[in-house]
Amino acid sequence: MCHACIIDGIKSSVGHCAVAASGSMHTDAGFIDASSQGRLREGVSISRVVDLTHTLTPDFPSFFGKAFEEENKFAFEKDGLNLKVIKYAEHVGTHFDAPIHFSADGLSIDEIPVERLVCPLVVIDVRIGAHKDRDYRLSLADISAFEREHGEIPENACVAMWSGWEAHLGTERYRGEDSNGVLHFPGFHEEVADFLIRERQVNGIAVDTMSLDRGCSTDSKVHYRWLPSGRYGIENLANLVALPPVGATLIAGAPKIEGATGGPGRVMALV
């Protein structure tokens, strides 16, 4: 994808939020105004686009068995075109959780304001803790350590947990199912969810595992605190290793399906 295409996409997505601010964003295609809400930073050149999305295959790990089923409805040799019918649960692969997923009357995926889907991306490295404890939860201590080194998490950001769990994709460890059927992988602590809602007012949280809650959770506390606040989550992110702790811009391509509780999407970062 060319830089001009990327910038045109940002312009149309951010819309009225990308109105004149004090600085500008430099690209090969020229300049766009910095956004006070989207936080497209002043004087930053886009050097690369990082794909944060796993390719969805039928055997991608999920809570529902097979990730999707497909039927070849038309074949080029016979019909002059190719077309498949694909059936899947909303929450498979690299996907979004909309507020309605864990609330009685929250926003569905198509109702999330588009300006919230383009925002600063903060990546918090918890690989050491996750390596020692597969049930690790990103904690307030992790937040404090991160902010001491990199500064305060900006308002309207998306905060991603980088546990390094992508390395286990294709092995049983990714789901971590034990002999009792309990899953084991890292997630957020509910105290962090509360803190990011109350003290940092961020747009979303994201993980490189199957769930915002750790795998062994029986009460989904993070989901129940986070999503009813009107915020979104992203699960099964890829390639966080390619991102800096701060400075990237998230382009969260959420699906726009009426009434949906979430769904697979294309997630990218501009660095």
Image (spheres, rainbow, N blue to C red):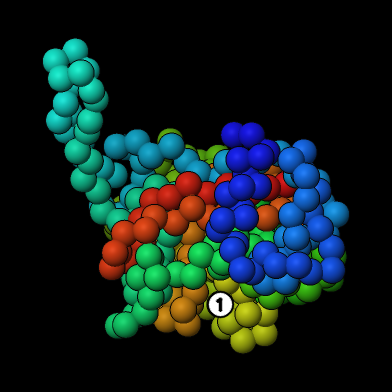
Determine the secondary structure under disc 1. Answer: helix
- The structure residue drawn at horizontal position 84% and vertical position 63%, both measured from the top left corner, is 23
Quarter that holds the N terminus: top right
Q: Looking at this view, is 45 or 9 the one in front?
A: 9
**Residue 162, percent from left and from top:** 62, 54
Location of residue 98 in the rendering, given as x and y in whole percent from the top left corner: 40, 68
Q: Would residue 15 be seen by someone viewing this image from the given angle?
A: yes
Residue at (34%, 74%) from the top-left corner? 100
Does residue 76 appear to the left or right of 233 in the view shown?
left
Residue 30: x %, y % from top left: 78, 45
The quadrant in which residue 69 appears is top left
Give the residue at mark 1.
193
Residue density around tag 1, few if under 14, some if 14–19, many if 20 or more, within 10 Å: many
Above or below residue 32? Residue 241 is: above
Q: Amino acid at mark 1?
A: Ala
Q: Is 93 or 13 nearer to us in this picture?
A: 13
Give the quarter of the image for residue 255.
Answer: bottom left
Nearer to us in this view, 3 or 200: 3
From where the camera sits, is residue 207 visible? no
Instruction: Point out residue 131 in the picture as x, y percentages from the top left corner.
Output: 61, 51
Q: Residue at left 61%, top 86%? A: 198
Q: Quadrant of residue 5?
A: top right
| Left or right of 12 on screen, residue 82 | left
Q: Residue at x 31, y 59 (%)?
A: 257
